[in-house]
Image (cartoon, rainbow, N blue to C red):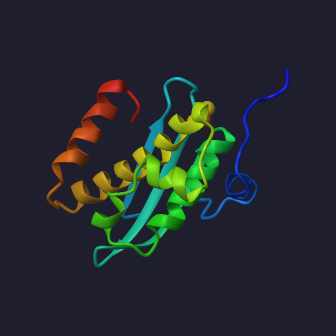
Amino acid sequence: MRSNVNYSKKVLAHFSKPHNLGMIKDPSGVGEVGNLACGDVMKLYIKVEKGVIIDVKFETYGCAAAIATSSVITDMAKGKKVEETLLLNEKSVTTELDGLPPIKIHCSLLSVDALGEAIYDYMKKNKLPIPKNLELRHARLVKLGMT
Ligand code: FES
């Protein structure tokens, strides 16, 4: 059967040559999330210095959209203040990739949630005040068994 999924050039470029692939040995925070519907999993590592994400890497077992969104969100987060990266969402990620097919929009959530979880982990370890919406996102993921 022929696939009806049409990806943008940017999605295909990030999928075929993902940026920031791998792990960070001594991370400031780690986020790991799974998509219950498809079983895909993403782990994202951040290194933070003076409130800025100076390095970010990911490992993903997932579809082309999951890999492309993981790759692009690491590019978008690197060099930004931690609080700034909390504003990244599915819309900003998919816009950066020139869109995703509607049936693949949910895949972009994996990268957004993994980044949120890595930040949550970093804030918790450093006893920093956790923003209410991040606390709620974390609680939702725990409740759903996604983290
Ligand atoms: Fe699982 Fe895309 S189908 S994240």
Q: Give 109 or 116, whichever is nearer the viewer.
A: 109
Q: In the image, residue 60 lies at what x, y percent?
A: 60, 46
Q: Quadrant of ligand 1?
A: top right
Report the side of 25 relative to 141 (left or right): right
Q: In the image, residue 35 lies at what x, y percent?
A: 50, 31
Q: Give 33 or 7, whichever is nearer the viewer.
A: 7
| Quadrant of the frame with the C terminus | top left
Q: Which residue is drawn at the image coordinates 68% and 43% (left, top)?
A: 64
| Quadrant of the frame with the N terminus | top right
Q: In the image, residue 136 lies at what x, y percent?
A: 22, 39
Report the side of 16 relative to 139 (left or right): right
Dividing the picture into quarters, in which one does residue 146 lie?
A: top left
Q: Give 65 or 62, whichever is nearer the viewer.
A: 65
Q: In the image, residue 16 lies at what x, y percent?
A: 76, 55
Q: Identify the residue at the far top of this view.
A: 1
Asked if residue 47 shows in the view, the reply is: yes
Q: Compared to 53, does 138 lie above or below?
A: above
Q: Which residue is drawn at the image coordinates 51% and 58% (left, top)?
A: 73
Q: Compared to 27, does 7 lie above or below?
A: above
Q: Identify the residue at the far right of this view.
A: 1
Query: Could you tell me how many numbered marks the image carries?
Result: 0
Q: Which residue is drawn at the image coordinates 32% and 72% (left, top)?
A: 81
Dividing the picture into quarters, in which one does residue 92 lie?
A: bottom left
Q: Identify the residue at the far bottom of this view.
A: 50
Q: Compared to 86, does 51 lie above or below?
A: below
Q: Give 120 or 9, whichever is nearer the viewer.
A: 9
Asked if residue 24 shows in the view, the reply is: no
